[in-house]
Each structure stands twice: as C-alpha cells, then as structure tokens.
Image: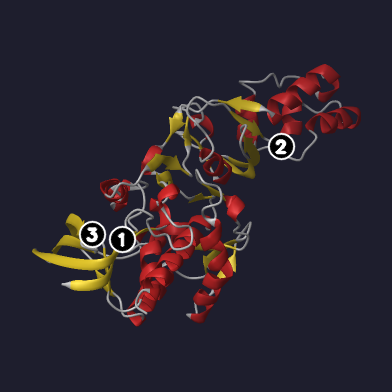
Amino acid sequence: MLTHCLILGAGAAGMMAAAQTGPGTIVIDHARMPGEKIRISGGGRCNFTNMYAEPKNYLGENPHFHKSALSRYTQWDFIELVSRHGIAWHEKTLGQLFCDDKATQIVDMLREELVQAGAELWLQTSLRELTHADGLFTARLDREGRTVTVQARNLVLATGGKSIPKMGATGLAYDIARQFGHDLTETRPALVPFTFEKRFAPISGVATPARLSNDRASFDEALLFTHRGLSGPAVLQLSSYWREGETVVVDLLPGTDLAGLLKAQRGQHGKRSLTTELGFHLPARLVDFLAAEVDLTGNLADLSDKRIDALSDSLHRWGLKPGGTEGYRTAEVTLGGIATTGLSSKSMESTQVPGLYAIGEAVDVTGWLGGYNFQWAWSSGWAAGQAIREKLG
C-alpha cells in the first residue's frame, strides 16, 4: 500500500499534522483511543494553550530553533480553531486556557479536522519494522490481527517522549531517529515533583504561595507539600531547570519584607507570640513544622533585630536539596530528545533524510507548565503538515 504520508502517533502533534498534510495520510497509534494525554490534561479540561506563549517559555539546546514554528502558528491561531468548533473556554491563571467542558472536545476537534483533510486514523496499530530505500519509507504494521505493509513518501515521528509510561509512552521516536543517523540530546523527566523521602509527610497536603529558584530560573507559584516531597506549579516549573545534587531555594513569603513586618509588629503587638504572628502569613501546619527546624519560640517583644533578620533570611532563603524526582512515572513531559541540529526549524524535516519529520515532545523543545507544550505540539505539527502538503503540489 503506497501513501503520501505516514504519521506515527495520534497525540496532539500527530493529529495536528494530519489535519494539514492533505489526502493520502495515515496516522497510526497503538492505543485504543487517540489523544490520551489530551484527555487527562488539565484535570480533564485540557490546558490547551497559553495566552502568553513566547519563545522564552521554552527550553532546548538551541534556544532559537522553536521560534519559527511558534511565530507562524500562534496561540491565537489555535484559539481561533477552538472557537470555530464551538468549544467554550476560559482563562484560569497566568494565561492558561482550559475547556469549559471536557478535554475530549479537543480530541474530537482534531479528529474531525484530520478526517476533513482526507487523513485516515488507524488505532490499535503497532509498528513492527521500518526501513527506508529509494525515497520511500516501508513500515510493517500489526493491525487488527494481521500484518500490513505501508509505503510512504513522508514519515512523521510524533510518538512523544518517555513521560507517563503507564499510558504507553516509549522512546520509539528516539530509536527511529537514531536508526536514520540523528543525534539525541540527553533526556530526563521534566515538570515533575521533587522527592525528599518522608521529610514532609507531616504536612502533606499543605499548599502555600512561594518562590522557588536556583542559579538558572525562578518561579512564583503554588508550592505543595506531599508524602513524597514537594509538588505544585512552582516545583514542576523549576524541575526543568534542576540537576541532581543541586539545592533549591524556597522563599515562603515572596514579595513580603518579613524582617520589616516583624519589627513593626514588635512595637505594636509585642506580647503576641512569634508563631501566632507567622500564622497570619503562612498555613498553621507549616508554621508548626518550621518550629522543629527554626527557633520560633518567644513573643515579638523578645526578638532582637539580629534574630529577626536571621529568621527572615531562613524563611526567605530556605535551602532544600531534593533526593531526586518522581521520574517519568509522573513527569508531564520529557526534557531533551531528537537534536534540533538535524532538523529544519521551518518545516521540522530532517536535514539528513528527506521526507523524515519529527514534531512535538519527541524533539528537544520543552515548554513551561501551563499550556506551552501543547502549543509546541500545535505549532510544530502545523509546520510539518504544511510542508508535507506543499509537496502534493
């Protein structure tokens, strides 16, 4: 069977590409349903893009590679597509856009778009063997209990990364890229909680606004203490910039001059206990926990300027060294992937093997938490799809 384009992976990027490539496209996926990560994202409502998506919100060995695709298919283009399909949406926080109803609306929209474009979707179909010769990719597939051979002029790698293996995530795209001579950048879990054994088990479930930082990045968002360690948006964001063995600095009162506040309250409410005063600014359970790590005894009137300054520094610069992360099991994305040195930033096509494309999470482009990775899926899928469609003439 000869076809124009074969897309491996019916996730966000793969379906988006299929909606652009035109007739003669087959999208395959081993799953029973397409778009599984879309379905579970955003608590089932899909954080499908971010109003403030810009190149600065992405990581990769080449900090400029993603600029072309993101500028040619923007968040506003995807928002227009969502609205055109009658999908109601809202902004939650920090530009994050969610469906008012279910995430499956986005899956249904993409499925409708690819069918209208003339593409076919083959689910519960697995790749057994892939070769390339004379300008054609030959794929042997397991489909509905039989072996099917498909030859395609163009092949798109859209199988994602290693994150959330229980949903079937594998390193297939990386293996194929290597097969065709492409380099990979180091892969590791990103947007993932930190682990601290059971250090924070006594305050599991406590959340508070915080600033988490290291030498490379800083994020002001919610911090969540768990049985296993630290989670919440601020942690997930910083995890993409963290390396094993590094210390994370936690500011429990970002934007607050704690030393100045305590000195002022000392004069007005000297008989108030330090723990009571801190309880006005931090969760009570967190204050109780901190009392075991920092001296919080006494009343405000008893505190010298020196002790106040030291306490303030402790809470504004609480140094913590994670034991690790929860790994790919809970990571929202994979950092690293197929090296962009071997890809065209305009078309996502291989510079080494004509007709081979790589898009989405499989590529060494990783976005922040908050809809940025979906936007990369839409933009890179669109760029590859448009380039392939142009080959039809």
Tell me the quadrant of the picture where the N terminus can be found: bottom left
- Residue 291 in the image: state x and y as whole percent: 64, 23
Between marks 1 and 2, how big is the CA–CA gap?
44 Å
Please give the residue where the numbered disc 2 appears in the rendered image: 253
Going by the numbered disc 3, the residue's amino acid type is His
Residue 250: which quarter of the image?
top right
On screen, residue 318 versus residue 202, left or right, reads: right
Judge whether 270 appears above or below 350 on screen.
Answer: above
Q: Residue at x 19, y 67 (%)?
A: 151
Q: Position of residue 225 (x, y in %)?
A: 53, 37
Question: Does residue 309 sit above or below 99 in this rendering?
Answer: above
Q: Amino acid at mark 2?
A: Leu
Which residue is label 1 attached to?
Answer: 9
Q: Residues within 10 Å of mark 1 (few under 14, many from 20)?
A: many
- The part of the image, by quadrant, that contains residue 90 is bottom right
* Residue 30: image tag: 3
Q: In this view, which residue lies farthest toward the left?
A: 146
Is residue 45 visible to us here?
no
Q: Quadrant of residue 393?
A: bottom left
- Number of callouts in the render? 3
Disc 3 versus disc 1: nearer the observer: 1
Dot 2, crowdedness within 10 Å: few (<14), some or many (≥20)?
Answer: some
Specify whether residue 12 is in view: yes
Give how far apart the Cα atoms at labels 3 and 1 are. 8 Å
Measuring from the top left, give residue 169's x and y in whole percent.
31, 50
Q: Amino acid at mark 1?
A: Gly
Element type at mark 3: loop
Helix, strand or loop for disc 1: loop
292 w.r.t. 202: above or below? above
Number of the front mark, 1 or 2: 1
**Nearest to N terminus: mark 3 or mark 1:** 1
